[in-house]
Image (tube, grey):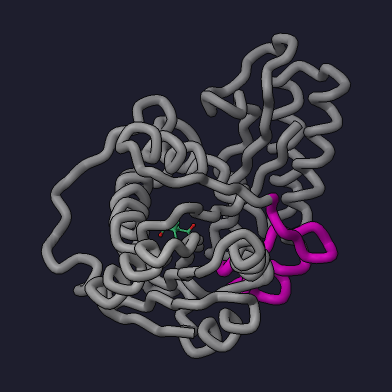
Amino acid sequence: MHVFTTAAELRAYAEARRSAGRRLGLVPTMGALHNGHLQLVQAAAAQCDEVITSVFVNPTQFNNPDDLRLYPRVPEQDAAMLAPAGCTALFLPSVAEVYPQPSVLRFDFGPLEQVMEGAHRPGHFNGVATVVSKLFHLARPHVAYFGQKDFQQVAVVRQLVADLSFDLELVVYPTVREADGLAMSSRNGRLSPAARAVAPLIYQVLTEAAAQVRQGVPPAQMQALALAALAEEPQITPEYFELIDAHTLQPVQQYSSGQPLALCVAAHLGGVRLIDNVLV
Ligand code: PAF
């Protein structure tokens, strides 16, 4: 597995492999890899000739300085996990390498980012779109792989690809879960044992709410029940719990037939912010 720390090295590698007719897959990550990331890498390895994985904790997408400071950074451990999963090139740049000058470009995704993560984390999707655009330009992938756990991120990246005519295919993989249902996340490692013990409640509440949606329980009632169920656990502070249209991401007030629906949640547990979602 190649390890590149400079943009020039990655660009040269990607150009050479593309010119040689190789199919390139890109798995963008912020490291502290878990099985969810590895499944993306394995999928890329099955479908592409070269798999580029980026490990970069992108400062511009953090609106909370503590979250950025405490985000786990274990590059040696990540590198050791990537090669056996089929990664052929690891991009491990510094902040100065990715941002040689402060980025002044601003993305506006309109209604797509005015809800959920975009509403609660101002500037988050501007940072995501900035770094993802840079990675797409440097790695020139034919296919880019993302996890469904970041549901809104997928919608924003899809819009980015369409609006900027990136010549690539997006592949989205279902959320990988622990045996007790907790969605795998690099932030899970920061949960105290007590917080980890109650964290599966988030997915339980999501699945109960999904069942209520299928039974036709009115959205406002379903949402109130879900928020109350989460708030019953004193360690959990829910931030939002939304039933949304899975395409527009706008909150759903009443059901209409054939509308694709998703339930999305964000909650704080002992200083750690977790998100999760299910398609209904
Ligand atoms: O999903 C993530 O880990 C990040 O948002 C991404 C896509 C790697 C951009 O920094």
Residue 87 placed where, x, y %? Answer: 55, 75
Identify whether 39 is placed above or below 94: above
Instruction: Find out whether residue 175 is within the magenta segment.
Output: yes
Of residue 209 and residue 237, the one placed in the foreground of this image is: 209
Residue pictured at 62% horizontal, 59% vertical = 47
Relative side of 100 to 249, left or right: left
Q: Over which residues does the magenta segment extend?
A: 174-197
Residue 276 placed where, x, y %? Answer: 64, 49
Image region (quadrant) for ligand 1? bottom left
Q: Say which quadrant the C terminus sits in.
A: top right
Quarter of image, res 39: bottom right
Identify whether 147 is placed above or below 51: above
Residue 250 placed where, x, y %? Answer: 53, 23
Relative side of 199 to 241, left or right: right
Residue pictured at 69% horizontal, 37% vertical = 227
Relative side of 97 to 10, left or right: left
Of residue 241 and residue 104, the one placed in the foreground of this image is: 104
Instruction: Find out whether residue 232 is within the magenta segment.
Output: no
Residue pictured at 29% horizontal, 56% vertical = 137
Identify whether 209 is placed above or below 127: above
